[in-house]
Amino acid sequence: MAHGYVDQKHALLTRLRRAEGQVRGIARMVDEDAYCIDILTQVSAATKALESVALTLLEEHLAHCVAQAAAEGGPVAEEKLREANAAIARLVRS
């Protein structure tokens, strides 16, 4: 079974690589004693990049995995809905 994000895989990997580069840049800034506000600005940008990935994955999960399980019904559907609710709660708290 293919995951729901399969059509977005290339875009997700691109965003993740960009976020990885941002994090490396932040580490370099700290190592080079950059100004705190400049570092915080970059942390915010990296955080937003990861949030974008998370939201795309959540959207695809709801549209594919949860929708398919809901159509089938039963305990699998209930479990997928619990998983989705827990994932949403984690994203909101972070």
Image (spheres, grey):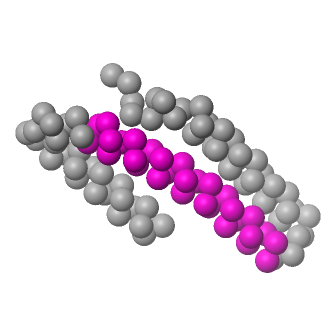
The answer to whether one can see residue 76 in this image is no
> Which residue corresponds to the image point at 62% horizontal and 61% vertical from the top-left?
47
Q: Is residue 85 magenta?
A: no
Is the residue 77 above or below the residue 22 in the image?
A: above
Q: Which residues are magenta?
A: 37-66
Is the residue 62 above or below the residue 9 in the image?
A: below
* Residue 77 horizontal/vertical position (percent): 16, 42
> Which residue corresponds to the image point at 46% horizontal and 29% vertical from the top-left?
6
Q: Quadrant of the N terminus?
A: top left
Q: Is residue 59 magenta?
A: yes
Q: Quadrant of residue 3?
A: top left
Q: Is residue 37 left or right of residue 80?
A: right
The answer to whether one can see residue 29 in this image is yes
* Residue 74 horizontal/vertical position (percent): 8, 39
* Residue 89 horizontal/vertical position (percent): 35, 63
Q: Is residue 90 left or right of residue 80?
A: right
> Which residue corresponds to the image point at 81% horizontal and 76% vertical from the top-left?
36
> Residue reaching furthest right?
32
What count of labels does the image hold?
A: 0
- In this view, the residue in front, 33 or 68, is 68
> Which residue corresponds to the image point at 54% horizontal and 57% vertical from the top-left?
51
* Residue 87 horizontal/vertical position (percent): 36, 55
